[in-house]
Amino acid sequence: MTRPAHFLTLTDLDARQLRNLLARAIELKRMQRAGERYEPLKGRVMGMVFEKSSTRTRVSFEAGMAQFGGHAIFLSPRDTQLGRGEPIEDSARVLSRMVDVIMIRTFEHDKVERFAACSRVPVINALTDMYHPCQLLADMQTYLEQRGDIRGRTVAWIGDGNNMCHSYINAARLLEFRLRIACPEGYEPRQELLREGSGRIELLRDPLQAAEGADLVVTDVWASMGQEEEQIRRRQAFAAYQVNAAVMAAAGPNALFMHCLPAHRGEEVTTEVIDGPQSVVWEEAENRLHSQKALLELLLLQ
């Protein structure tokens, strides 16, 4: 099986690769919990380029490299010439001569594309304004663990048509589930992605209609990093799109709730839901570690 050169969007994997990766993530999780020592990346180094801060992304990648016997270098804009205006292409040419894999968490998606085009080593998109594919690996692993194959199931995305929503559209195409997106007018996902996912995607305005009979309900913050100045306007626009007890009651009896975190309790989700019995957000967060370890194996070893 040909390994992908980079992981910039979920569609850099084909359906078979994605399913194999999810199964491998579950196995790596079992091994780690059993205390089995497995260090396939001994002597390997990951460069972690952060233009957007993160808790889960940094800890999961850094811990994953350590557990694999490798090492990770954290690079913020204050620590690199990127923060002083060095062209991203030049940074890619230099960094990729010194490390074995690079993850980037940034704003514009074209930055990771330009970086990858000049890199000698695999590049991982750890979040851009357009996509968040690493989170989808964790979400899909969590669903597989909790409920089995997601093929043929129904997922309700409630809230902003943002990077997470875009990645859910890609996941629906690869893993063959139905995706209902409920969002206010003016906050829809990109039209080209809706076209690509046509047949599996339904765009709605009513969150209760989207959630009806769903197997999984997912949301995200109403204002992402970089959108803070829009917070008041967004709070008004999304007021009817909170995931609450009524939304979860409309979903199927075995429905799960997911959120990529951090959550704003009382805004996009109530405390009752996120701390409730249908919520798997903590398992989902932990699975960033295991699914990304499976991704590193795929990119570097297979």
Image: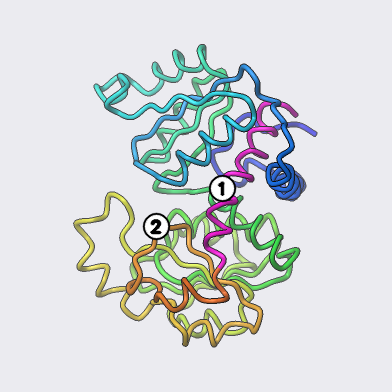
Does the magenta-highlighted stretch encompass residue 100? no
Identified at 38% across, 34% down, the residue is 50
The chosen color scheme is rainbow
Q: Tell whether 185 sits left or right of 202.
A: left
Q: Please name the predominant secondary structure of the magenta segment in the image.
A: helix
Position of residue 3 measured from the top left corner of the image (x, y, whole percent): 71, 32
Q: Tell whether 122 sits left or right of 83.
A: right
Screen quadrant of the C terminus: top right
Q: Quadrant of residue 150?
A: bottom right
* Total residue callouts: 2
Instruction: Identify the residue under disc 2.
Output: 262
Task: Please provide the residue range marked out in magenta.
Answer: 280-302
Identify the secondary structure beneath mark 1.
helix
* Structural crowding at the residue carrying mark 2, measured as other residues with C-alpha within 10 Å and reported as few (<14), some (14–19) or many (≥20): few
Screen quadrant of the N terminus: top right
Q: Quadrant of residue 200?
A: bottom right
Q: Is residue 288 above or below residue 267?
A: above
Instruction: Identify the residue under disc 1.
Output: 288
Q: In terms of depth relative to the viewer, which is nearer, 64 or 241? A: 64
Residue at the extreme front of the image, as rendered: 35
Disc 2 residue type (three-letter): Pro
